[in-house]
Image (cartoon, rainbow, N blue to C red):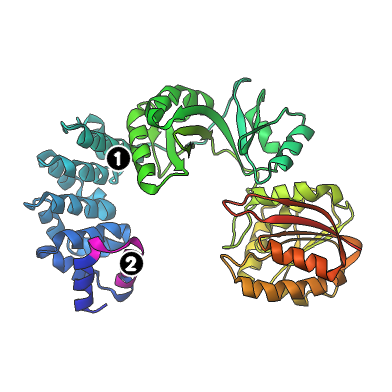
Amino acid sequence: MKTAEITEFVESYNELPAAERKEGLAELLKSGGLQRVYAQTKGGNARAALRILADLGERAKDVALANIDGLLKLLRDADPKVRMLAAQVIGNTCAADYLDELIEGVMHEQTVFALPSYLLAIGRAKSDRAKRFLESYQLRSDLEKHRDEESAALSKALANFVMRTKARVRVLPSDVIVLASPNLNVTYSQCKEAGLSPRKFGKYIAVTSLADFYDIYKLRAYTDAYIYLGCSPVGELPAFLSQREAAVMQRTGVTGYRLEVRSVAHEVRIDIIKKCVAAMKQLINTPSSYSVEIMIEIDGDSAQVFLNPLTDNRFSYRKKAISASINPGVAASVCAYASEFFNPDARVLDNFCGSGTMLYERGFYPHHSLTGADINMTAIEAAKENSRYAHVHPQFHYIDALKFTAKKYDEILVNMPFGLRVGSHSHNERLYKAYFRILPEILTEKGIAVLYTHEKNLTEGLIKSCNNFEMLKRATFDAGGLYPAVYVLRKK
């Protein structure tokens, strides 16, 4: 960026859409133009220039340190928004070194809307003195709106001193455990097979009477397990959550939490979080080092509230993934769905293996061998890295699926390219047609193919036209808002 371009970017920054801001910040960093941004803090563009430096966070550390005397002077500027933004920049970059100045600033600050920025900056110092100051700090705002913001900032600042600890979960027989499921029927069946008494609970599967919460992790055909905290009208959520604080601490033994709100617009989400955090006095909102997550799912005027204790290590083998990697809970559910057709002596191939997740989940069932192939070297490297932590160790090959045809396999289990994050539909048309030409050739007689794909019309058309397969099963799965299908085919 040239000087004139930087000036124009600073002057228009507050009106730019978020995507353009992000692009402009990246260009600033690339061009080394931050010093020229800082130079504009001395004129009429001071607010916007400081906002840019604040939004860059730690990436603005070098320019902040190079101009620290000027930034400290801005803490005493006549404009309260300039003081507020200067506190943010110092807090993001060098709070520990200038804690005295931040404390002095907040104690002399007379504009209440600026107080939260000072408190958050002091919290980032993460020292004993900062902690003592925050613990002794008395709220100063009179208006309810400003007082809530000041209180929320104080809580968030104190959260920097809460260490993340792993929950030790205990449940009562009456507690309802709900499982987020890619396919309700698959999860339901696995629960039944395990001797539980499941029931469908909206888009979840619910179980009760667990003597040990950790028993739920013996099952694999689901993505997340929550403790159900109940249902509340949206307007009463703050009071509802304040009444559930003791239950959260009793079930987990921790106080640090993060609040997540789903299925609403961003502005509504922020408003709900702000009000709920302000209402809870025993739990500590620690979004950067939380021990448990409280998840609120909004449906009209009603809200379901769930507690995720974050103690699930079922998929701990997956240390690395790529952009198109399948969710391991979905992969486990796909395998459970097709498992009645698995051969304990099968030679299994995934020739779109990615980081290997589908093979690792197939490895929980008896087999003879597991083989993966992928045209992406990064994927193969990720799959091999995951093998170091897994219970099985497939062979992985860096090769085009269409050229990996030298051997025959009893089972082929694949997450087919979706054409969303990687590729395109037109590319998939060519790839799928070519793949269906080689698929019968690399399967043994009566071999099984399990295809997981979002390209349902394309896949079903190819199954019919090639006439080499008998369809044994088909089901739709939920994959984070997408609804791919699983096809279990037997070679004729």
For marks 1 and 2, give the CA distance. Answer: 30 Å
Q: Position of residue 40 (x, y in %)?
A: 14, 67
Whether residue 472 sits left or right of residue 243 in the image: it is: right
Which is more N-terminal, label 2 or label 1?
2
Q: Magenta-highlighted stretch: main secondary structure?
A: helix
Q: Is residue 394 left or right of residue 482?
A: right
Residue highlighted by disc 2: 20
In this orientation, which residue lies closer to the viewer: 385 or 147? 147
Tell me where the magenta segment starts and ends, as one range.
Answer: 13-28
Front in this rendered view, residue 485 or 348: 485
At which x and y percent is residue 13? 24, 64
Placement of the C terminus among the 4 image quadrants: bottom right
Q: Residues within 10 Å of mark 2 (few under 14, many from 20)?
A: few
> Neighbour class for label 1 at 10 Å: few (<14), some, many (≥20)?
many
In the rendering, at what x and y percent does residue 94 appear? 25, 54
471 up-or-down from 336: above or below: below
Judging by the rendered image, the residue that carries numbered circle 1 is 157
In reply to whether residue 18 is colored magenta, the answer given is yes
Q: Nearer the viewer, residue 68 or 412?
A: 412
Camera sees residue 142? yes
Query: Given the image, on which type of amino acid does mark 1 rest?
Result: Ala
Residue at disc 1, secondary structure = helix
> Total label count?
2
Answer yes or no: is residue 399 visible. Answer: no
Residue at the location (12% across, 55% down)? 74
> 381 or 195: nearer the eye?
195
* Image quadrant where residue 63 sits: bottom left
Q: Quadrant of residue 113?
A: top left
Query: Mark 2 belongs to which amino acid?
Result: Glu
Q: Residue furthest left?
A: 78
Instruction: Give the quadrant of residue 401.
Output: bottom right
Residue 351 coordinates in the image, percent (x, y): 74, 67
